[in-house]
Image (cartoon, helix red, strand yellow):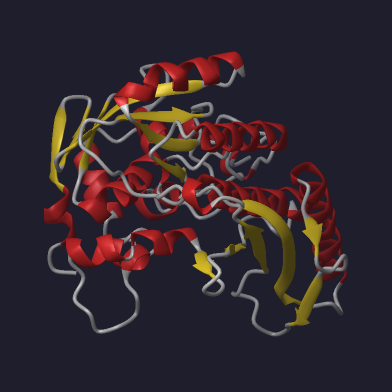
Amino acid sequence: MNPLHDKEKVNLINYIPEPENLEDVVYTLMVNPNLSTINYFNDFSDQHISPESLEETAMDESGLFELDSTGQFLAMTTHAFHHHLEDDPKTATEILISRAARKMLCFGAQPSAVSAFLYHIDFGDHNGHSIASGAKQGLENAARHFNLKVTDRKIRFDHFIGHAPVPPTIIISMMGSVDDREKITNHAFMRKGNNIFMIGKAVNDIGASEYLEFYHGITDSPLPHFDINEEVRIQHVLRLLHERQLISSANPVGKGGLFFTLLRAAFPNDLGFDITTDAEIRRDAFLFGEAMGRIIVDVDPEKEDDFVDALTDLNVPFFTLGHVTKGEIRIDDLSFGYTDKMTSGL
């Protein structure tokens, strides 16, 4: 049996060789269209991308917008997912909704409603109905856990037949509100010297990651580590940190894992980061794995004690990564260059 196809296997990473050269991994993934800086910051205009233009669009990543001159803000985000939708639609849908809610909460918005749509499903086939049924269960379970209203209890899906290479895909849209605009948190690192923390548990997991697919060429792998109860705890923590104004920025660990999450936070203000990895976790999993339930925050040194006390009181796992630099990227005392060099030529 191929271990990569055994859904009971949790040690997929044991079958993947760990790269000796991290720099090779980084610069290979930099050309991945899903991780390229142009994907995250381009406004699809003819405007040249520069650190200045990235800074101007720093808040656009949040999906926050002002309704009118009254100053009322809403949040909106749209996410899609196709990994294992056919064999585990319930969990895949829960992961997708958790990811969207986590992103919204990072910016200080409160998720309130979600809708879902299935694409590339043949409702004339039994498997299409099974996917729809599982996705509906996942949608309703996530909505209960996160206290979300579902705009349509029935998963809607289009009729799609005759194009087998296109995988079934679920797309969700989430709406939220901003109670206090003064407590909106940016996704960008704001100041050199701030300390960087990861909230959540690091695990030896690279399942369904861009790293596994793009660098190792493995497109069929188990879903990433996910525990919906951990997600509920992370959401509670984020609300408290926003309320106490203990964080300067917050980002959900997403595509590309921790490294590319840090990179997206560093680019807008032309800053960098100096971090140390967890010695108990494989470095490729720590940096590029896409396990759920993790947040990257940077904290003013003057607020660090209160931040640590808050997480300790809540018994939430966290890891001290390092600090924000003037522009250099360093991992375990190895320099990867400067962020401004990574945006040149885009």
* Residue that appears at 71% across and 55% down: 93
Q: Name, please, the residue furthest toward the front.
A: 70
Residue 226 in view in this figure: no
Quarter-of-image position of residue 136: bottom right
Can residue 252 be seen here? The reply is yes
Q: Residue at x 39, y 60 (%)?
A: 59
Percent of width and height locating residue 253: 46, 43
Residue 48: percent from left, percent from top: 19, 76
| On screen, residue 273 above or below 344 | above
The reply, left or right, for residue 7 in relation to residue 54 is right
Q: Is residue 31 left or right of residue 35?
A: left
Based on the displayed image, in which of its 4 quarters is residue 51 positioned? bottom left
Quarter that holds the N terminus: top right
Q: Nearer the viewer, residue 189 or 4?
A: 189
User: For this rendering, which residue is in front, 162 or 290?
Assistant: 290
Question: Residue at 64% across / 54% down in the picture?
Answer: 96
Residue appearing at x 72%, y 33% in the figure: 229
Residue 304 lies, in percent from the top left, at: 38, 21
Image side of residue 47 versus residue 210, left or right: left
Where residue 4 sits, quadrant-wise, is top right
* The one of 98 and 13 positioned closer to us in this rendering: 98
Is the C terminus in the top left, top right, bottom left or bottom right quadrant? bottom left
Total marks in image: 0
**Above or below for 225 versus 301:** below
The location of residue 47, given as percent across then percent down, is 22, 80
